[in-house]
Each structure stands twice: as structure tokens, then as C-alpha cells.
Image (tube, rainbow, N blue to C red):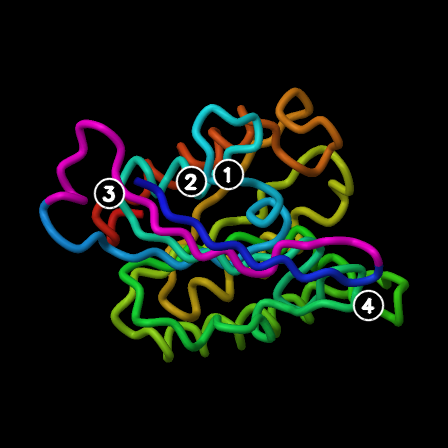
């Protein structure tokens, strides 16, 4: 049985999912859930995580839902549309990753997946967006991942490259390189997402459709099924 609790925060007339706490048990044929307590997974992200659901068969099934159901994780999702390592979500009135309530107050998870950076090409100037140099993205990601790995020293921390659709491609290389450098500095595994969201998997150029979410999940699952040192 799947048990779900969702908390929705509303800012500037836009609803953004800030916290989703979901007990995800393994599907049929997976013995992990019945063998004992399920391992725990913390997901931190933006709208690519926040705007989707844990409902198999739904066109909005989340990438993290595919991962958790395949591997039998009990999952907490702390995600907010529009956010990033240094950019607050909810039309610049929400939280950044390090500001997100609960990020550093979880029972120690077995696995942490950080999905984001797509929004970090810009910072908020009031409600306006101003492009930022990659050095600012690196500094923000580095500080966040250092605190995350210090807070949860025994967790496997996997950092996804921003799953980037066809829009705003001029920022993808610099932002992705900054996040990869921060991940390497802090001993996190980094997962490239090159080509995961082509035009036919993202109806708006940014957010994945079901095939896009499944493609992200497949990259993550491939990495998680390897030994950490092999990634």
C-alpha cells in the first residue's frame, strides 16, 4: 500500500509543491519491502520533481516515483517549482535548496538525490530574473552540497545534471559544469543527463512528459545499480 502526505505552498497566485512525504513500497515481485524496513531516499529538486506525482499509470508520474518503486525506497520529496541552488522558487518568493524547510532535519537517509540547477542560470532581482555568471552557481552548489554531505555523512549522495530541455540552451554548459565541479569537490556522484529531454519528451521545452520522466529515472536507476565507485 502506498501512503502519501503532500504539503502545498502557494505564493504569488501560483501553487508550487514544496514538500511531499511519501512512503513508497516495492511493487509486486520485489521482496525488499517485506524483508524489513525499506531504505530511505530524500529527493531535493525543482519543478521537474515537484510538479509530478507518485501514481503509476498517470501521465504525470514522477521520475523519482519510478526510481523508488523499482528499488523499494521510502521517499521524502522536498521540491519547489522555479527553485535552484541559489534561486528561490515560486516566482522568486519561495525557497532555494538550502532554505528549503526540512532539508537538513531528516532522519538520516540511505540515499539523497539532488535534481536541479535548471533555474540557476538567473538570480532574482525582485521578481525579475538576471543572468548570473557560472561562478555564482558553483559557489551556491558547493556550499549546499558541503552542508548536505556534512549533515548526512553516511548517505549516498547523487547529483543529477540539470535535465535540460530545448529552451535556454545557451546556459546549459556553464551551469552543468559548475554543478559537476561542486559535486566532485564534495565527493558526490554526478550523473550526466545529456540528451535525456529532447523536444519530443518535453511539451513546453522545459518539463518532461511521461517518457521524459521515465528517461530520467532510467539514468538514475542505471547509476544506482552500479557500485558507487564505478559511477
| SS for callout 4 | strand
The mark nearer the N terminus, 4 or 3, is 4
Residue tagged 4 = 124
Any magenta on residue 43?
Answer: no
Q: Are marks 1 and 2 in contact (CB under 8 Å)?
A: yes
Mark 4 vs mark 3: give the one in front: 4
Residue tagged 3 = 226
| SS for callout 2 | helix
| SS for callout 1 | loop
| SS for callout 3 | loop
Q: Quadrant of residue 80?
A: bottom right
Q: Which of the numbered marks, if any, corresponds to residue 65?
A: 2
The mark nearer the N terminus, 4 or 1, is 1
Any magenta on residue 27?
Answer: yes
Q: Quadrant of residue 43?
A: bottom left
* Gap in angstroms between the C-alphas marked 3 and 1: 22 Å
Q: Are marks 4 and 2 in contact (CB under 8 Å)?
A: no
* Category of crowding for the residue at label 3, using alpha-carbon neighbours closer than 10 angstroms: few (below 14), some (14–19), many (at least 20): few
Q: Quadrant of residue 107?
A: bottom left
Q: How many marks?
A: 4
Q: Is residue 120 left or right of residue 68?
A: right
Amino acid at each position: 500500500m502506498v501512503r502519501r502526505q503532500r504539503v502545498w505552498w502557494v505564493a504569488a497566485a501560483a501553487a508550487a509543491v514544496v514538500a511531499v512525504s511519501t512512503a513508497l513500497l516495492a511493487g509486486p515481485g520485489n521482496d525488499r519491502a517485506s524483508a524489513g524496513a525499506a531504505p530511505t531516499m530524500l529527493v531535493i529538486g525543482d519543478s521537474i520533481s515537484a510538479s509530478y506525482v507518485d501514481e503509476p499509470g498517470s501521465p504525470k508520474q514522477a521520475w523519482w516515483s519510478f526510481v523508488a518503486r523499482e528499488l523499494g525506497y521510502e521517499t521524502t520529496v522536498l521540491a519547489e517549482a522555479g527553485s535552484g541552488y541559489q534561486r528561490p522558487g515560486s516566482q522568486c518568493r519561495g525557497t532555494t535548496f538550502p532554505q528549503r524547510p526540512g532539508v537538513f532535519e531528516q532522519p538520516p537517509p540511505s540515499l539523497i538525490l539532488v535534481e536541479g540547477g535548471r533555474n540557476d542560470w538567473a538570480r532574482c532581482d525582485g521578481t525579475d530574473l538576471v543572468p548570473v555568471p557560472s561562478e555564482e552557481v558553483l559557489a551556491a552548489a558547493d556550499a549546499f552540497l558541503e552542508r548536505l554531505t556534512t549533515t548526512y555523512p553516511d548517505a549516498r549522495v547523487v547529483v543529477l545534471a540539470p535535465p535540460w530541455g530545448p529552451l535556454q540552451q545557451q546556459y546549459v554548459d556553464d551551469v552543468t559544469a559548475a554543478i559537476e565541479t561542486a559535486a566532485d569537490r564534495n565527493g558526490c556522484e554526478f550523473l550526466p543527463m545529456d540528451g535525456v529531454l529532447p523536444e519530443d519528451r518535453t511539451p513546453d521545452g522545459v518539463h518532461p512528459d511521461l517518457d521524459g520522466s521515465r528517461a530520467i529515472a532510467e539514468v538514475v536507476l542505471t547509476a544506482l545499480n552500479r557500485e558507487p565507485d564505478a559511477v
